[in-house]
């Protein structure tokens, strides 16, 4: 038994572990482990609590995508609310590429197997096979669409791959601008859950074709689609193309017309494919509509008449009381429908070659010719050099160093104030213009604001108008002013140049017996009558001027308007006006500018117009009475017809559709 | 002990083996099995339907002779008015044919009419469909339009030997190009999410802005005929509400469908000739 106990004692020495209650070496490791544990916990807390926002953002940026859609633009309407520029739905069939990931991969695998089966050594790389697979799959969908609408469209592989790499979340356009019957067929034939679907988007629509094209302007594509206060600015954002005004009203009032963009934030899978529905979505809003002062009936009637003779030119009509522009026409122009969906190089080249970018109504600077005699007459009456009783004997020319011939070389004989205006007697105005001097005429022209742009709310109005005087000639021509310059200026020739818009504003001012009319292109039904400084003419003087201008259209140089031979009479409308035939020197030689400025009705002026037609053959007579007055006639006639109709019954005279 | 554990896991193993086997079965076999399932269950569906017909028959037998005579008179009057309508239609068809010849217009698609009893209704929030008692035995094709006295019923989506499945106009997977009656511009109609016992509705999109529809002045939505599936002029439903969509180009709205869609007993399949 004792032996057994001894053995147990020996074994216990080997089997039973003994511990000291305190070992400094172990304590060191306790501290070390504790420190490491604290470091770990602190690191974990830092990462999980302190940096939680950073990781949440990183996760969000990796798994979410933002898409911005442009809002439709507002409409542009004429003064009666008719749509001049609207939005038209454009239908296209588009394919959601991000929904085709599995199909692409399957097709890629099939292509690889085919290469291997054919024992082709040149097996394309994975990236190349994916490109081929994408084109194949997309063409397959396109073939289904072709079968429904009877088309034969083919996929552009480069374009497809570019879209895939840059704009995966945006649908890829298979066929654009579908006809109603085509999209109706597709709506019915394409499965509801097909990745190929019919989409409608907004494009600009111009119901009146080229009418007022220079005024309205056009839009171009832009990537600058922004949505304020929409979260996710740090996310990868895809923007659908929007539009931006590039010229005319579209550009000038882009901020008003521009719609508010919409947007959506989608969650995406690791391959970048969208997961519906969106996490957040804001619908786009249409821009505000803009009402112009133009009257499309008058505009179209004017432009149609201008197109008849095929000459370049412009016509402007103003509402005399308010200065609102009723017509602003310039030829040649361009069909705005050709700018949709985008302006092609061929169309742009055609516009360029025809000089159709040029907005003659606000950019064309022409000598005003005899229409300026109205201003010379006012200057003379105010300064006392001309009285309503003044007469001049016209032998058909005026001698001042050389012969200055009268209108058409006619000898008008003893000519009074009214007859001088009626017959456009140059000699009458040569003499009185020379007597009063250039300064008085120039001062009067400046009083009527003919030396500066009108400030209309349109882009690119020229500032190249010139009211010459001695200082101007010395500064620009380095030559002294001579008497010939004065007599030329008195009849609207020489260095004097103005725009048709200025002359329309001038005519409206004279009709109101004031010196200025501020033209505006915007319609305001509450706009008050304009009031500016009076001309300063006595009632007798003003009456004589009005009588002279009415005589112009009855028996004078614009009698074509009333005699009823070449143009039909406008019953009950008394018109006052003045013709002009100015000479302009350009690279082709000397061409005539046919002018007519006028107003109606004489007893209560309400509409003022200016027409300037450029002659197209150097040296050929292009008289104001023969070329510009018929345009004025069309305008006055349409205006008079509209006045005779009850409100709201005005028919649309012309539509391009 | 381990063998006992294996015994306990046997059902799970069996299930796993079956799932794996099913996954490995070729697609063609799966499709065949699925079709076979429909064909095997079709007699049951048909038998149930015929029993219901028999039930209706005997319930009708309970009506008195006076009631039957009265119903017969009503029917005769209805028939007389239909006769007039048929004659008028014949005249119009002749006129249409004359104008088509005169203007060299393509003829509308012509159809053969196949009347079929409804064997089963299958409504849920996800789909709305019916099974009819005719299939490929009567030459019904997939995609054929189905109509009833109230207008469009739907489109055939599956055809079996003696039955066919019709996707109803109220189903979210049904879409058609319609027109507002009196207008020619196509609009998109799609079935809505319809709870089981609620009146069926759909949604209409691409509605021109000048179309005004409200509960007080609803607009009738009819088939356009543009899609080439349905003939033009069939009633889809009434647009009870239309409001401008986010794009500013079109309106979207709600279409109220015929409530009889939920209790259809007989329909007509238009089989294109």
Image (cartoon, rainbow, N blue to C red):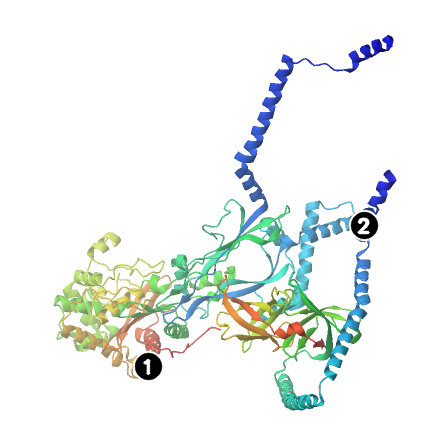
User: Which circle, 2 or 1, is nearer the viewer?
Assistant: 2
Above or below, A49 against A289 in this view is: above
Q: Is residue B26 visible?
A: yes
Please state the horizontal and vertical placement of residue A147, each as a whole percent of the image.
68, 66
Seen in the image, is A468 located left or right of residue A107? left
SS under mark 1: helix
Q: Quadrant of residue A490?
A: bottom left
Q: What residue would you read off at disc 1? A: A644
According to the picture, the residue beneath numbered tag 2 turns out to be B15
User: Helix or strand or loop: what does disc 2 sit on?
Assistant: helix
State the count of labels: 2
- Decide which of A559, A232 is in the foreground and name it: A232
Decide which of B171, B41 is in the foreground and name it. B41
Q: Is residue A656 left or right of residue B168?
A: left
Horizontal and vertical percent position of residue A591? 34, 67
Query: How far apart are the two marked residues, 2 and 1, measured between alpha carbons?
Result: 91 Å
Chain letter of the residue beneath label 1 in the structure image: A
């Amino acid at each position: 038994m004792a032996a057994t106990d001894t053995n147990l004692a020996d074994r216990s020495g080997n089997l039973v572990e003994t511990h000291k209650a305190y070992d400094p070496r172990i304590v060191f490791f306790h501290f070390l482990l504790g420190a490491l544990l604290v470091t770990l916990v602190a690191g974990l807390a830092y990462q999980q609590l302190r940096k939680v926002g950073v990781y949440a953002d990183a996760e969000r940026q990796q798994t979410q995508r933002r898409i911005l859609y442009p809002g439709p633009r507002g409409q542009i309407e004429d003064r009666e609310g008719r749509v001049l520029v609207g939005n038209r739905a454009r239908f296209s069939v588009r394919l959601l590429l991000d929904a085709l990931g599995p199909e692409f991969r399957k097709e890629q695998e099939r292509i690889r197997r085919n290469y291997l089966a054919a024992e082709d050594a040149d097996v394309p790389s994975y990236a190349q096979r994916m490109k081929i697979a994408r084109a194949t799959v997309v063409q397959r969908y396109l073939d289904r669409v072709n079968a429904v609408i009877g088309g034969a469209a083919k996929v552009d592989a480069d374009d497809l791959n570019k879209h895939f790499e840059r704009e995966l979340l945006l649908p890829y356009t298979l066929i654009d601008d579908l006809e109603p019957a085509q999209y109706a067929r597709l709506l019915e034939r394409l499965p509801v859950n097909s990745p190929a679907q019919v989409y409608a988007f907004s494009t600009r629509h111009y119901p009146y074709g080229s009418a007022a094209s220079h005024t309205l302007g056009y839009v171009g594509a832009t990537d600058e689609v922004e949505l304020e206060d929409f979260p996710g600015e740090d996310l990868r954002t895809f923007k659908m193309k929007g539009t931006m005004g590039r010229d005319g009203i579209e550009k000038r009032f882009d901020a008003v017309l521009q719609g508010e963009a919409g947007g959506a934030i989608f969650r995406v899978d690791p391959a970048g494919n969208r997961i519906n529905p969106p996490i957040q979505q804001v619908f786009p809003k249409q821009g505000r509509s803009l009402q112009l002062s133009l009257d499309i009936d008058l505009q179209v009637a004017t432009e149609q008449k201008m197109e008849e003779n095929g000459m370049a030119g412009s016509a402007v009509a103003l509402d005399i009381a308010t200065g609102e522009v009723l017509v602003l026409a310039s030829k040649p122009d361009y069909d705005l429908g050709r700018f949709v969906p985008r302006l092609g190089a061929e169309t742009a080249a055609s516009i360029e070659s025809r000089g159709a970018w040029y907005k003659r109504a606000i950019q064309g600077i022409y000598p005003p010719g005899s229409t300026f005699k109205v201003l010379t007459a006012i200057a003379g009456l105010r300064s006392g050099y001309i009285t309503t009783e003044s007469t001049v004997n016209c032998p058909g020319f005026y001698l001042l160093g050389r012969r200055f011939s009268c209108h058409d070389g006619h000898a008008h004989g003893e000519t009074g104030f009214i007859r001088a205006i009626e017959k456009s007697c140059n000699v009458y105005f040569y003499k009185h213009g020379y007597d009063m001097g250039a300064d008085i005429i120039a001062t009067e022209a400046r009083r009527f604001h003919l030396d500066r742009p009108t400030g209309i709310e349109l882009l690119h109005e020229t500032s190249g108008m010139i009211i010459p005087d001695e200082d101007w000639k010395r500064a620009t021509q380095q030559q002294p002013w001579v008497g010939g310059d004065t007599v030329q200026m008195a009849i609207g020739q020489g260095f004097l140049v103005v725009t048709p818009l200025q002359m329309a504003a001038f005519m409206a001012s004279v009709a109101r017996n004031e010196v200025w009319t501020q033209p505006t292109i915007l319609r305001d039904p509450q706009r008050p009558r304009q009031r500016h400084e009076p001309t300063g003419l006595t009632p007798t003087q003003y009456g004589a001027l009005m009588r002279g201008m009415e005589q112009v259209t009855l028996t004078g140089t614009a009698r074509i308007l009333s005699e009823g031979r070449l143009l039909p009479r406008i019953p009950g409308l008394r018109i006052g006006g003045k013709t002009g035939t100015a000479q302009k020197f350009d690279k082709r030689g000397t061409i005539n500018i046919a002018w007519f400025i006028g107003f109606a009705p004489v007893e209560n002026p309400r509409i003022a117009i200016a027409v300037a037609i450029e002659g197209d053959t150097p040296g050929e007579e292009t008289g104001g009475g023969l070329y510009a007055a018929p345009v004025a006639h069309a305008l006055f006639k349409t205006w008079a017809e509209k006045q005779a109709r009850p409100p709201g019954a005005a028919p649309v005279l012309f539509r391009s559709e | 002990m381990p063998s006992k554990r294996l015994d306990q896991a046997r059902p799970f193993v069996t299930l796993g083996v079956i799932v794996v086997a099913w996954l490995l079965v070729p697609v063609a076999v799966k499709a065949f099995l699925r079709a076979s399932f429909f064909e095997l269950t079709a007699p049951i569906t048909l038998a149930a339907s015929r029993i219901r017909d028999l039930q209706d028959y005997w319930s009708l037998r309970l009506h008195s002779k006076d009631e039957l005579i009265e119903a017969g008179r009503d029917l005769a009057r209805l028939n007389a008015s239909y006769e007039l309508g048929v004659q008028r239609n014949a005249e119009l068809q002749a006129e249409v044919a004359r104008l088509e010849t005169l203007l060299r217009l393509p003829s509308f698609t012509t159809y053969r009419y196949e009347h079929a009893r409804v064997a089963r209704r299958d409504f849920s929030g996800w789909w709305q469909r019916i099974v009819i008692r005719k299939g490929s035995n009567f030459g019904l094709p997939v995609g054929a339009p189905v109509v009833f006295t109230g207008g469009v019923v739907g489109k055939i989506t599956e055809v079996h030997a003696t039955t066919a499945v019709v996707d109803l106009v109220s189903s979210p997977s049904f879409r058609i190009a319609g027109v507002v009656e009196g207008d020619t511009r196509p609009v998109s109609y799609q079935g809505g999410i319809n709870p089981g016992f609620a009146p069926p509705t759909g949604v209409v999109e691409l509605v021109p802005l000048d179309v005004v529809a409200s509960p007080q002045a609803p607009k009738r939505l009819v088939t356009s005929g543009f899609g080439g599936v349905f003939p033009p002029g069939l009633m889809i439903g009434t647009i009870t509400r239309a409001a401008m969509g986010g794009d500013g180009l079109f309106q979207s709205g709600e279409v109220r469908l015929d409530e009889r869609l939920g209790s259809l007993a007989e329909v007509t399949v238009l089989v294109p000739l």
